[in-house]
Image (spheres, rainbow, N blue to C red):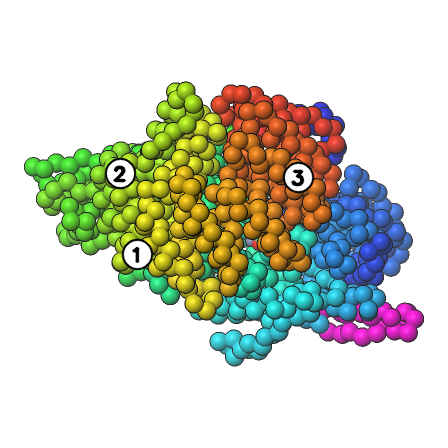
Amino acid sequence: MLQMIDDRGTGPGAVVINRADYLAPAYWIDSVDLCFDLDPAKTRVLNKMTLRRNPDVPAQPLKLDGEELNLARVLVNGQGTSFKIEGSQLVLCDLPDAFELEIFTTTCPSKNTKLMGLYVSNDSFFTQCEAEGFRRITYFLDRPDVMASYSVTLRADKAKYPVLLSNGNLVAHGPLEDGANGARHFAKWVDPHKKPSYLFALVAGQLVSREQRITSRAGKEHVLQVYVRPGDLDKTEHAMVSLMHSVAWDEARFGLGLDLERFMIVATSDFNMGAMENKGLNIFNTKYVLANQSTATDIDFSNIESVVGHEYFHNWTGNRITCRDWFQLSLKEGLTVFRDQEFSQDLCAEPSARAVKRIEDVRVLRTAQFPEDAGPMAHPVRPDSYIEISNFYTVTIYEKGAEVVRMMQTLVASINDPLGRDGFARGMTLYFERHDGHAVTCDDFAQAIADANPMSDLARLLPQFKRWYAQAGTPRVEALGAYDATARTYTLTLSQTCWPTPGQPVKEPFVIPVGLGLLGIDGQDLPLQLADEPSAIAGTRTVVLTQASESFTFVNLDAEPVPSILRGFTAPVVLEFGYTDAQLLHLLAHDSDPFNRWEAGQRLAVTSAVNAIKSIATNADGTCANVLNDAYLGAMREVLHHPTLDSAFKDLVLTLPSETYLAEQLDVVDPQHIHAVREAMRQQLATALKADWEAAYAANHDTGAYTPDPESSGRRALAGMALTHLCLAARTSGDAVWPGKTLQRFKDAGNMTDRFNALAALVSSSHALADQALALFHAMFKDEALVIDKWFSLQTSAPDRGGNILPAVKQLMKHADFSLKNPNRARSVISTFCQGNPAGFHRLDAAGYQFWCERVIELDAINPQVAARLARALDRWSKLAEPYRSNARQAITRVAARSDLSKDTLEVVTRALGQ
Ligand code: B3K
Ligand code: ZN
């Protein structure tokens, strides 16, 4: 791959970086004193650093990274010096062992459409430095293992930029003498903690803040602030409450307190991703800060809670202990996702709400990460090489990385600590004792967790366990059960395999913890006793698969049990077991493990869908009817009416597997067939259960005064689902009552969740009233950018009927509110269509691919990170049926043939083509 890219002459940036090539830096930077004169057209940056040679590596020149900078002056110990520019690096030779280096550069933030480094959004300045954005601000050793002390002076026009923020503590501020009539002012910030350059941040602009003083468990006073644009203050309460919960949770669960006097969150509407954990000055996409009941849905509220938590938790896992190099990214991201998942679960008052959160997390993993692990971008949790590190902020690093950490917790469990929470917390304590203030590796983390639990399975199996970091691909675990009535035993044989992934043709066996239960005829958990054990354990237990194949024999069983395997989804694997429908219905009705109870319903739906998809090709008219059998429909009816299951869980059980998930269950994918079958299933659920949906709506539609708690959110979700099905049922019956009621609910709704769900019900059933409601919705929220994003994405993700969505998408791009430069808006229209609407996108006439190709190229010139994400929409092209497959390949080839591609997009399309 390297060869091909170099041969194309794509420039010095497009080189492969290998993990094995890591070398410690030749110099350390101890302190950085930055002074900014902020101006959108020309910002001046004076960077004074103290450096010293790293005695552990051979003497060599100092090579500083820089990108799109205008260099004006370089002084060593106050004297002019000779230097070279080699590619994008500033090279200084013959340096003393310790010295001061002063570099003066200028940049143009207003032209920075990549949104990396220093940029302007809505007349304010923001920065984004992770992973390699600091080099777009000044020349530096822009790598995470160089940790320095920073002091930062910001100077700017006072009227335009009244708020001047950077990391750490504000030590001085006031007017500047140089401006006429005190028109300019300054602020000086000192960060008391050493940090890598990717955690640097500054913000300057017209902002207002919500402020909260808190006292920590240790009795320390802190101030928490959430900064937004004037007019948005009424949408900051939830973010602040989430931040306070985060501070309290990290103290309570891991003994980790806030190490700063002041902790700030700032929201911007132009941001490449969700949020960024800059030390003491988190910068967020407005999507993960702003919420009130009129503009945000329950899902928004819950996302805000977890992203605020995630960024806050990075303060320890990422900022205090950081990554030695970017290959170790999951050291901070996998661990911090695990922490934010645990945080959200711990905030749930009810065990059932915890289970719902776990199911949601697994759903993300299986619909996004499993396909990644099976496609051309597959990479280990700790990758071995990359061209552009931005491409490796992936669901594998984040979500699979979190599962790897979760397995560690499971593998340190003991009799007195059955979930492993105490053992894992001990491991975290040891991790901080050993590595606080340092840049380390995934090995260091795993070693600390194991060493703190010397008697655990993790300690015993550590070298093999670490294959989860090294080997890509999703393991398949095949389970076979054999009951011996004479011996009264049940033997479960588990075998693992993992398909080849790019560069890894053969895999060694993984360590796979498998949560297990056996259900009796009455649906109760049977006592579990392995053949060599003296007594039985009630309920769930975990067996650990370490070989290619292993058998576990359970004794004292009077009848053949129904196995409940991989309870709680204890490992990120695909489980295959030849369940009969009767067994799955038994699990769906009785399993004490909510995850597997839900999973049983999903398996039943997948089996019916896959059979129908395979047969649809043989139907002359390409349609299908009655995909779901009566037993399934009856089971769903029972779930809907169940007296004790909560609404959020019912909503999950009644949600059919997504088209993307179904595609992953097939060897050859015809997206139109999958869509036709899934739509037929939706229609059948709607019609067959009409009376039951009516009952569910009646029981759940009134949730009283709005609060975004799991219980009432679940009820709103189920009421919305009922409306969608009632509108779908009306499609075939012609009944006008429910669409009419839905429109009325849309108009009368007291919160955004109910309003949006009603709108979505009309849109997803393609009802004639949808247009009217959409127009009204736009008029009501025309000044709320995040709501307008929802308005766009609802239309671009609507079920395709006869190819109507692509023309609608093109039309929406002409709307006055559309902008390619704003990542949220571009994603709400283009990415939602290409990555969230398979049937609209994968068209027989290849017009979807043509559209994708044009947008990728267009976006690449503006913002390579956004373009490269979009480029991944065709990752799974080689699985497609013809003619989709050839057409998709051609489209990717057209993008790859461009000579001016960013290395971000080039890496994605090159890998897609398998070169
Ligand atoms: N660490 C940032 C992601 C930075 C992405 C750079 N392309 C947000 C997070 O994971 O918390
Ligand atoms: Zn993160």
Mark 3 C-beta closer than 8 Å to ligand 1: no
Q: Residue at x 57, y 36 (%)?
A: 805
Magenta stretch, residue numbers: 171-189
How far apart in space, not on screen, are marks 3 and 2 (Cα)? 42 Å
For badge 1, the amino acid type reads Leu
Q: Is tag 1's residue or tag 2's residue first in the polypeptide sequence?
A: 2
Q: Amino acid at mark 3?
A: Gln
Residue 4, visible in the rendered structure:
yes
Residue most toward the right?
180
Q: Which residue is mark 2?
A: 630
Residue picked out by circle 1: 645
Residue at 38% x, 55% y is: 697
Asked where in the image residue 416 lies, by quadrant, the reply is bottom left
Quarter of the image where one finds residue 344: bottom left
Q: Which residue is mark 3?
A: 811
- Counting residues from the N terminus, which is met first, the one under dot 3 or under dot 1? 1
Is there CB contact under 8 Å for labels 3 and 1?
no
> Is residue 274 left or right of 648 when viewed as pictured?
right
Bin the neighbour count of mark 3 within 10 Å (Cα to Cα): few under 14, some 14-19, many 20 and up. Answer: few
Q: Could you tell me which secondary element the residue under label 3 belongs to? A: helix
Q: Nearer the viewer, mark 3 or mark 1?
A: 3
Instruction: Say if mark 1 contacts mark 2, CB within 8 Å.
Output: no
- Identify whether 589 is placed above or below 185: above
Residue at (72, 28) in percent of width and height = 898
Residue at the left extreme, as displayed:
486
> Compared with residue 637, is residue 304 higher up or lower down, i.e. above or below?
below
> Is disc 2 surrounded by few (<14), some (14 to 19) or many (20+) residues within 10 Å?
few
What whole-number distance in Å separates the C-alpha atoms at marks 3 and 1?
Answer: 44 Å
Give the answer, above or below, for where 820 lies relative to 507: below
Q: Position of residue 9 (x, y in %)?
A: 74, 28
